[in-house]
Amino acid sequence: MSERKFLHDISTPLTSLQMDLENAISILEEGKEPEGMAISMGLLRKCMTQVKKSVLLVQQRREEVQKAETK
Amino acid sequence: MNPADYTVLIVDDEDSLRESIAFDFRRKKFNVETAVCGQDALKIVESRKVHVVLSDVRMPNGNGLELLDWIKERDIYLPVVMFITAYADISIAEAYDRGADAVFAKPFDRAALYDAVVRAISSLTQPLRRGGTRVEANAAVKMQFKASGISLNVNGLNMGRGGFFLACEAPFPNVAEAAEFRLTHEGSIVPIVGKGVVRWVRQNANAEGPSGCGIEILDLDDQTRNEFLKILNFIKTKSYIPLK
């Protein structure tokens, strides 16, 4: 995975994560939506998926860098 | 502006991001349509009224650039807001030149995306859209960049639907820097006075054009807007901010 591809791949889950977190916080702070808690929980679960995706990409990239350095 | 009167089409092959953006705009009371590729987006644009398209660039089955070209050929008045990845196959300057109304690098700011959508459908830019190609305008331009304190006096510029390209040499203003401008065009009696923002800077001349910067127009007063409309009627332009 090149640096370029890594940045490309990780930018999508990070963007999604940021948007969902901001929306979850906003829903909880406003407290106006009747299903606010359930919606926020759904968003937070989705955030967790995006965090896992990002972590996986970072781990893959780290392994590649380590391999390249030991050659 | 009542968001419920407007439909935003979100095009991205990544389910998570497409859903995140759709959720955000639904919360803001917009009508939202979604598509997973350029071809699906075309079918939606052909079959119902869409006011703004938010599209990724890299997608299978019709990428964002093909979609942009097709939409601008069909309806120059339809705003297209594109978002791109950190490294895309197109420069920000080229995306504006091809007609994109706003360009974002992921990860982008949610509030900035919302502002761009509102601006795209607002009365500020909507009446300023005209078909044709980018053109050079005979105008004396006075620019004052706020943060860097740079002042420019230039004769001639290339004008787009939502901004202009200004050829200049170093020192260059910074991207995202606010600017105030005053254009005196041969076809207008009153100077065009307004506020803008630097969207991109080309520090060295290359095949795309001379060194300079792309300025998006953010604010024009009523009198100035009427004069600007006269100029756009006169010169015709497709680019949102021209490349050169």
Image: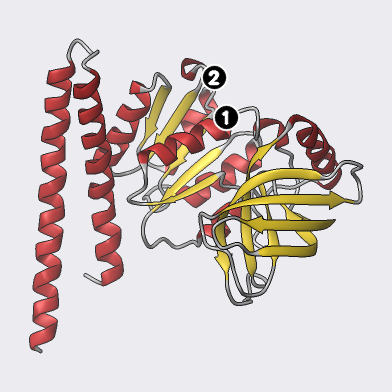
Q: Residue at x 40, y 35 (%)?
A: B10
> Amino acid under label 2?
Met
- Residue B161 place in picture, x, y as percent: 69, 44
Asked if marks 1 and 2 touch (Cβ < 8 Å), the reply is yes
Q: Residue at x 76, y 57 (%)?
A: B142
> Amino acid under label 1?
Ile
Q: Nearer the viewer, residue A27 or B19?
A: A27
- Residue B67 place in picture, x, y as percent: 51, 45
Front position among marks 1 and 2: 2
Q: Residue at x 18, y 17 (%)?
A: A36
Q: Which mark is residue B1?
A: 2
Q: Residues within 10 Å of mark 2 (few under 14, many from 20)?
A: few
Residue B111 falls in which quadrant of the image? top left
- The chain letter for the residue carrying disc 1 is B
Residue B194 falls in which quadrant of the image? top right
Q: Which mark is residue B121?
A: 1
- Residue A47 place in picture, x, y as percent: 15, 39
